[in-house]
Image (tube, rainbow, N blue to C red):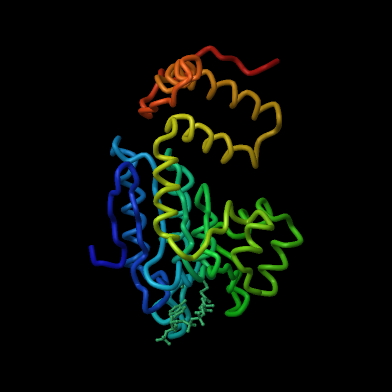
Amino acid sequence: MGDELLVETRGAVRVLTLNRPDKLNALNPALLEALADAFGGIEAEASVRAVLLTGAGRGFCAGADLTQNMGRDARDVGALIDKHYNPMVWRMRALPLPVIAAVNGAAAGAGANLALAADLVIAAESANFTEAFIRIGLIPDAGGTYFLPRLIGDARARGMAMTGETITAAQAADWGLIWRCLPDSGFAEAALEFATGLAARPTQALAAMKQAFNASGANSLDTQLELERDLQHEMGTTPDFAEGVRAFIEKRPARFTGAAGAPIQPGLAPRQ
Ligand code: T3D
């Protein structure tokens, strides 16, 4: 593997840094493959309890590398999406750990949507988001047409996609596109602190929450209530639930380990 992606472990946080700063961390096949590998292996490592994704230099990610991937011959962009982008989004969404995107600078095209595929997005105040696809005759990919309307509503989603206008981090936070906009000064440290805080939370509950939120877009209320019941049943068997309740009663901070509980028991029938 080259150095397009820096992979470090800081405490219980796996830090993935897109590392092509001269091109604002634009995505080439090597970087996309490194990302897929990095996301693919994480869940087997019990000591890793959160993932932080950020960019080196002044950009977060400028989307597909337009100098490598396109512009020469007609390319099958759909095949590139199928091979590289979709598996990455699936892995990020399915990973049973919180994924935090720390957007340190420009996030454009698939770079913006890569950030939006994370569970939580924080951005430095000088960062920005551009659905740049329309500028080159493409549509938002990497989940853009899915995430945008769910996060900010149809009007703003279509506005961002169809105009390609750049949205500041402050505006993104105001619209609910991201969780929080933070000062530029000390952003990297603040992002790691934020991820470290999540890594110390009940990991099984975060994973189950993620599963429930992921499913909610397609589920009816009935189905979602049943899913919540099943997941909560499982959470009730985790050591972290016992510890959380004990710590509350003993009026002390909880010490969560992230250990798994019992799997869902068969026989929890759907509601009639
Ligand atoms: O082929 C496939 O994989 C299909 C999939 C497509 C999915 C997509 O993501 S399509 C969308 C692709 N991305 C874009 O269209 C965004 C292109 N970049 C920009 O519009 C601007 O760079 C930004 C708005 C993001 C930032 O602007 P600014 O002024 O801060 O920086 P800059 O000067 O434009 O860029 C700095 C350098 O990065 C520059 O190189 P240079 O001149 O210093 O040698 C620039 O060429 C390079 N760079 C920026 N974006 C890309 C890039 N190089 C390659 N590919 C890029 N996407």
What residue is at 42 percent from the left and 72 percent from the top?
26
Quadrant position of residue 215: top right
Q: Position of residue 248 (x, y in %)?
A: 50, 19
Quadrant position of residue 196: top left
What residue is at 62 percent from the left and 63 percent from the top?
170
Quadrant position of residue 189: bottom left
Q: Most extreme residue toward the bottom, as rendered? A: 72
Asked if 86 appears above or below 238 in the picture, the reply is: below
Asked if 15 appears above or below 56 in the picture, the reply is: above
Image quarter where the N terminus lies is: bottom left
Q: Position of residue 111 (x, y in %)?
A: 49, 66
Q: Most extreme residue toward the left, as rendered? A: 1
Q: Most extreme residue toward the front, as rendered? A: 251
Image quarter where the C terminus lies is: top right
Q: Most extreme residue toward the top, as rendered? A: 267
Relative horizontal placement of residue 24, taking residue 215 as reference (left or right): left
What residue is at 30 percent from the left and 48 percent from the top?
10
How many numbered discs? 0
What residue is at 64 percent from the left and 30 percent from the top?
224
Asked if 35 appears above or below 64 in the picture, the reply is: above
Viewer-closest of 66 and 272: 66
